[in-house]
Image (cartoon, helix red, strand yellow):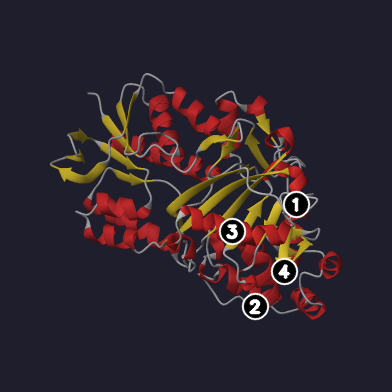
Amino acid sequence: MSKRVVVVGGGIAGLTAFREIRRQSPDSEAILLEGSPRLGGKILTSDFLGRPVDEGADAFITRVPWAVELSKELGLEAILTRPATSNAYVLVDGELRKLPEGLVLGVPTKLVPLLKSRIVSPLAALRAGFDRFLPDDWPGDDESVGGLIRRRMGDQIADRLVDPLIGSINAGDTDHLDAALAAPQLETAARRNRSLIMGLREQAKNSSQSSGPVFLGFENGMTQLTETLASSVSGSDIRTGVPVTAVEVSGNNLRVITDAQSFESDVVIIAAPAHQAAHLVASCQTAANRLSSIEHASVALVTMGFKREDVGNSLDGSGVLVPRSEGLLTTAVSWGSSKWPHWADDGHAIFRVSAGRAGDTRALALDDTDLVEALLTEIAHILDIEGNLIEWRVSRWIDAFPQYAPGHDRLVAAIERDLRSHMPGVFLTGAGYKGLGIPACIHQGGQAARAALDYLRTS
């Protein structure tokens, strides 16, 4: 007897789950429902100065294999492209200072380059070096990234290097982000070695990863991945513009309710942010309450285009990170036309300027024009820009960045137990649960699909 699977959400996790269902169980009736008019979720590419420029993520990390593997499966491997530069800067006391050699997620593993960088004081650099000699002082489970770095390396390393980098990736405050989830490479190194520096050096020595690029993207933008992924299941029942309002238990099955109709289903995979999933599973109050407790941060990403000749900075890097201590609205500036040379045609410079993070909602209070003016004033000073904007675009990602507070993994496990007990057949996947970033969402989508199929076989 044919089984029905409904996937709620058409972002990268939902699309991956849907594709896996179609591949592993072609006899099942699979339906994907996406509330917005398009597929792709937080992956979006649109035209800017006559070329495709990403409004969200413009690359994925290669340290984990899942995005690379999916690209190969979809026949996209040949058109993957790597950033042209790996140099980057951090703003310290209003000045650009180059990130030193030997950083791992902002943690210095080489002290001489750190001293020469002048990012931290000589005393702070020496304090960081003491990590190699300090006794093991791990306080136990559920440590924050900031807590780990401050106790091993001191406050300046945490505030000027690690928080600007990891905090930028997560739009968060590293003093409130779970180290095991937001920075597993650091947490693992600290657990396996008394010294964080020595643990990271040991990781590098034992790493089997090739010397290939750390990041990869697509010349036509990251939407190329989601569009090809959607095309790989063309002919399937994929519906956009169909917002789901609730998922409920209906006898021995589940009912997926939309504004216009409802669907009976044996399994439902919810590939939606935690705060949206909370509304969908409201009939399971404990799961809904726990899902609602996962905080999210919002970010505005302003893309700006200038004549290259109007920018005084040499732009010999991929961008600049801005620590909280600088007091600016800007949190980071990606030098897109240096990072991706195919963006730099016709003598233009393209920047992607980020604003907003956990605890800083100033960008949300500004309309587009005021936001652009405020950010333009800041980056004009940082990058010595004297000319006028040629083109600009504001992309607002509201509640798009889940904040993995210490203990987040146990919270997600409790949510999954709640659903197994009260809404069997409902599975969660996406950035809000077990990993941020495109590769992690691809991995989770596949895992959710396989768990759903196992459930169908045994139920």
Q: Which mark is residue 375?
A: 3
Quadrant in which the C terminus is drawn? top left
Residue 54: name its quadrant: top right
Q: Which residue lies under the disc numbered 4?
A: 94
On the image, the x and y values in percent for residue 114 come to: 81, 67
Q: Which residue lies under the disc numbered 1?
A: 206
Residue type at tag 2: Arg
Q: Which residue lies under the disc numbered 2?
A: 151
- The crowding category of the residue bearing disc 4, from other C-alpha atoms within 10 Å (few below 14, some 14 to 19, many at least 20), is few
- Label 3 vs label 4, nearer the camera: 3
Sequence order check, earlier mark of 2 and 1: 2
Nearest the eye: 374 or 331: 374
Nearest the eye: 25 or 275: 275
Sequence order check, earlier mark of 3 and 4: 4
- Label 2 vs label 3, nearer the camera: 3
Sequence order check, earlier mark of 2 and 3: 2
